[in-house]
Amino acid sequence: MWWVLHVDLDQFIAAVEVLRHPELKGKPVIVGGDGDPTKRSVVATASYEAREFGVHSGMPMRTAASKCPDAIFLPSDPAAYDEASERVMAVLREFPVVVEVLGWDEAFVGVHTDDPEALARDIQRAVTERTKLTCAVGIGDNKLRAKLATGFGKPSGIYRLTRDNWVKVMADRPTDALWGIGGKTAKKLADMGLTTVRDLALADPEVLAKRFGPKMGPWFWELARGASGTEVTATPWLNKHRSRETTFQTNLTEPAEITEQVAALARRVADDVREEARPAFRVGVKVRFAPFVTTTRSITLPEPTDDAGVLEKAALQVLEMFELTRPVRLLGVWATFENGLDSRGG
C-alpha cells in the first residue's frame, strides 16, 4: 500500500543550537534576532523548556524575556540551520522512498510498504544516529492526514491518521486544527456557526463558496473531510519567495523615511531574486505598526521580472496602499517567484 509519512524535526532551530552548545541541554533556549531581548525582534523558535512559560515563535523578544526571564537568548544563524537540514534530508534520501522537502525541518516521504510504523522507527533511528536530532513521524493515507498526524506524535513519537480514525480524532477539534485554516479563517467560520471540524464537514459547500470564494470555500469543506493529495514528488525544494525585513529600534514616523527604507529593502530583494535566477511575478510589503499590528499588501506584476528598478517601483506602489498614520516599527518587502504561491498573510 502507498503511504505518506511526514517527518518533522523536534524544536529544530533550538535543537541545532543545543548541539552547538551542549551546556544548554534541558534549559529554556530562545532564538531570534541578534540574541538581544532588549532590542526589537521576534522569536524564531523556543525550546520545549521555554515553551512551558508560554513563549512561542513570532512573539516579540521582549515579551518572551518577560515570560521567561531565565531563558538563554541566542542570535539566529540561518547558515547553520541550512547545513543541519541538508544532513537530515540526505539521511532520508538513503531510504528506498520518495522525499519531498517542505522546508528546513520537515519533509513528506512517499513509500509502498506493508508496515509504515516500522519504516518510521527506522527513519527516526537513522536521523538521530547520523545527526543527533530527533523527529516525530506522522503516517497518513494522504498528505493532509500525515501532516496532522505529526502533531499528535510530537515530540519524537509516531502517529497514524487515516480515513479509519479521522472522525474519531478530528471531528470535535476546532477548525484551525486543520492544516490550511488559520485563526482569521476560523473566526469567519465561527461567525457562520461552524466551530468544529465536524461542523465544517457537514456544511453546505455552496454556502462556503459564497462566503470564501468558489475555490477556497469548497476546499475548506474538503479539508474537514480529510481530503488531500497523495502524490509525493522528489523535485528539489525551491524557495517560493525571497524577503527582507528590518525592525527599527526607534519607530519611523516620517513618510519619506519609510519610503526610503522600503526602497532599500526592495533593492536587496531584487539582488536575491537575481541570485535565484528565477523571475518574480508578485511583490508585497509588510508594515508592522506600533505597538504590534502587522498588515500586508501585494500586487501582481504585469509580467515576471528580475529587474531591480521594476521591483523597487512595485514595492513603492504597494506602500501607497497603506495609511501611514501610525508609527512604524517594522518594514518588509518580498517577491514571489513564478513557480511559487503567494501565501503570506497579515
Image: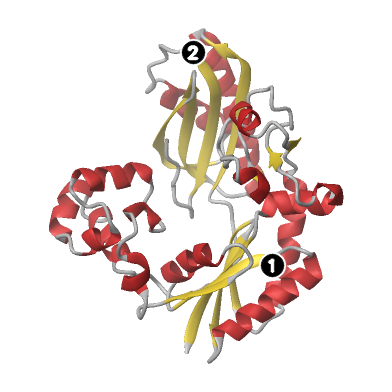
Q: Position of residue 223 (x, y in %)?
A: 32, 63
Q: Earlier in the sequence, mark 2 or mark 1?
A: 1
119 in relation to 173, above or below: below
Does 108 sit left or right of 168 as displayed?
Answer: right
Please tell me whether mark 1 sits on a helix, a strand or a loop.
Answer: helix
Amino acid residing under circle 1: Met
Vertical side of 245 occupied by 199: above or below: below
Toward the viewer: 326 or 127?
127
Question: Quarter-wise, where is residue 263 in the image?
Answer: top right
Could you tell me which quadrant the C terminus lies in? top left
At a point 72% along the width and 40% down the height, the residue shown is: 76
Please identify the residue farthest to the top as the structure is shown: 254
Identify whether 81 is placed above or below 38: below
Q: What type is the residue that disc 2 sits on?
A: Pro
- Percent from the top left, x then y, of residue 210? 15, 49
**Picture coordinates of residue 304, whole percent (x, y):** 47, 44
Image marks 2 and 1: residues in contact by CB distance under 8 Å: no
Q: Position of residue 259 (x, y in %)?
A: 52, 16
Identify which residue is drawn at 65% across, 34% down: 68
Q: Is residue 27 above or below residue 91?
A: above
Q: Residue at x 23, y 59 (%)?
A: 200
Drawn side of residue 189 relative to residue 179, left or right: left
Q: Give the left or right position of residue 218, taking residue 60 as reference.
A: left
Task: Give residue 89's mark.
Answer: 1
Other-residue count near label 1 (Cα within 10 Å), few / some / many at <14 / 14–19 / ≥20: some
Marks 2/1: CA–CA distance: 43 Å
| Residue where numbered disc 2 is placed | 327
Q: In the image, what residue occupies the spot 35% across and 78% down?
A: 163
Front residue (pair 215, 309) = 215
